[in-house]
Image: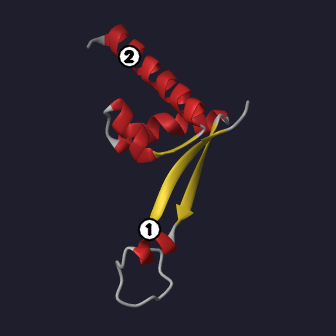
Amino acid sequence: MQGDNLASFIIMLVTSIRDYVQLKGRTDLQDIARHFRIPNSATVQMLDFWIKKGCIQQLTIEDNQTACKLNQCKTCAGCNVYQQIVYVWLNK
């Protein structure tokens, strides 16, 4: 892709990501990246655009109980075994 075509594609992708999060209401980074078949790093940059606009909020959820149920540790030290980043649509 060259010049204008690339810019149009990026604008379309950024808009599609916004629409996807709005449709789902709440979704995680891996789901978005997998849906659009793009790397997590590119997805984060596009989501940051909408976070700055106030349309999407990023949340970090720590889920120790799920990790503990999977027996990932031999003993419990109250560590943060699992953190998930989710993106939430803000009603604007």
Q: Answer above or below: position of 20 versus 61.
A: above
Q: Quadrant of the C terminus?
A: top right
Q: Name the residue under label 1.
A: 82
Asked if residue 83 can be seen in this view, the reply is: yes
Task: Tell me which label, 2 or 1, sits earlier in the chain.
Answer: 2
Q: Position of residue 42 (x, y in %)?
A: 37, 37
Asked if the residues shown at circle 2 and circle 1 are in contact, with their CB atoms under 8 angstroms apart, the answer is no
Gap in Å between the C-alphas at discs 2 and 1?
34 Å
Residue at 38% in and 16% down: 9
Q: Answer above or below: position of 54 versus 83.
A: above
Q: Which mark is residue 30?
A: none
Q: Position of residue 54 (x, y in %)?
A: 67, 36
Q: How crowded is mark 1: few (under 14 residues within 10 Å), some or many (20 or more)?
A: few
Residue at 32% in and 34% down: 38
Q: Position of residue 76 (x, y in %)?
A: 45, 88
Q: Answer above or below: position of 86 versus 9.
A: below
Q: Name the residue under label 2.
A: 9
Instruction: Pick out the residue farthest to the left.
Output: 1
Nearer-the-camera pick, 71 or 60: 71
Residue at 43% in and 23% down: 13
- Label 2 element class: helix
The amino acid at mark 2 is Phe
Nearer-the-camera pick, 68 or 83: 68
The amino acid at mark 1 is Tyr
